[in-house]
Image: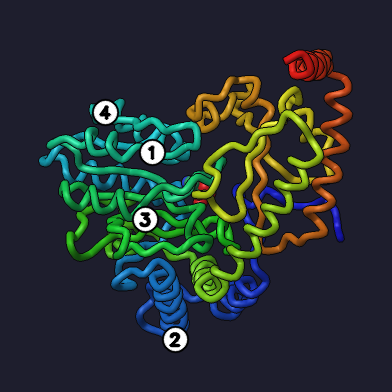
Amino acid sequence: MKTPVYLDNHASTPLDPRALEAMLPYLTDKFGNAASRNHCFGWEAEAAVDEAREQVARLIHAASPKEIVFTSGATESDNLAIKGVVESYKEKGNHIVTCVTEHRAVLDTCKALARSGCAVTYLRVNRYGSLDLDRLREAITKQTVLITLMAANNEIGTIHPLKEIGRETKARGVLFHCDAAQAVGKIPIDVEEMGIDLLSISAHKMYGPKGIGALYVRAKNPKVRLSPMIDGGGHERGLRSGTLNVPGIVGFGKACEIACREMSGEAQRMAELRERLKDGLLSRLDEVSVNGHPTERLPGNLNISFAYVEGESLLMALKDIALSSGSACTSASLEPSHVLRALGMEDNLVHSSIRFGLGRFNGAEEIDYVVDRLVQEITRLRSLSPLYEARRREGRQGAERALKAEHIS
Ligand SMILES: *Cc1c(COP(=O)(O)O)cnc(C)c1O
């Protein structure tokens, strides 16, 4: 086993060697511009893009590859979907419904639109990060043009009931955009069955290269109208101008093809490793709590609060393991995660939280190593914490009192 161990697969995944291999010719000999119509270099590039478009479409069960628009990643896809719909459906209304636990790419886009006069409703979540569908129903008005809700959360892994949301939005004639950056390739996504009208995907979250992604845009029942964000040569049916990133697109397509084949077996293996990690930590440490939904969560996600331990200090001590804490590093200050806060957690517990993101290239040996190292460092840090010692004494005394009371009665 090699260190450092990478357990931050929600931030980015390593490139699958099979995706790299598919990309290499397009970084060397096959360098043509996919928009060049007059020679074989262009045709070769275009054919590769067409194949990748089919691979992406197949993974999410899109009715046609024409519904796939290549972008630079999920951030751009989220912007195009949300701003593009708002701009295009102005005459219908100016209201969007989203959720407090969304990714910044969605929240900040909504915030920007709110500054220019859009009304935004932010749905709250329960302590597991789950939505209340009745609240969603109540939030939709005659002015609502778009519901934007993620498939699976990037911090706590909670999966939203997409089919139910899709059914609701269809019944009300409202478009449904879904940021599925963490879900595509990890859990089954079917835009037809789930009634999704727009779907954001990012290649580097599913073992493809960085800087490439897609937006699925429904062409039928209903046909989604979208205003482009980038003007230019009219690439991607005018929705996203700019010379196509052919090697990136080929790697992304290959990653989708691999996911199609291997997703179900891999999900099973991820869930087993995740349980091994969770059981290892929970059996050897006290004062720990699991954040997110107990069952409706991504197979490779685990989020745990280790009370009385500062997450950032823990990560500093664990230089041999790549993890994320519940403190988001924005500028100079360490802001507590807006997702964990939305669950109703106290700030100090948020700062004690660690996100584990398991992926394709992790093995059981690594998990056992991570458990050992965490137990070691958490025990050491807690031994330096007067608060933890006080809590333990109190706990022991409390237990002794309870035991005495039992003897008396
Ligand atoms: C990573 C991520 C994004 C941003 O994707 P990029 O391709 O890096 O722009 C958006 N939404 C979610 C849920 C993510 O996990």
Tell me which numbered mark, 2 or 1, is placed earlier along the sequence.
Answer: 2
C-alpha separation, residue under disc 3 versus residue under disc 4: 24 Å
Task: Return the residue at label 4.
Answer: 116
Tell me which numbered mark, 4 or 1, is placed earlier along the sequence.
Answer: 4
Q: Do labels 4 and 1 touch, CB within 8 Å?
A: no
Task: Return the residue at label 2.
Answer: 40
Q: Which mark is residue 199?
A: 3
Q: Which amino acid does label 1 sit on?
A: Leu
C-alpha separation, residue under disc 3 versus residue under disc 1: 19 Å
Label 4 environment density (alpha carbons within 10 Å; few <14, some 14–19, many ≥20): few
Residue at (39, 51) in percent of width and height: 77
Relative to 361, is 8 above or below?
above
Which is nearer the eye, 391 or 210?
A: 391
Question: Which numbered mark, 2 or 1, is in the foreground of this view?
Answer: 1
C-alpha separation, residue under disc 2 versus residue under disc 1: 51 Å
Q: Is mark 4 on a helix, strand or loop?
A: loop
Relative to 288, is 157 above or below?
below
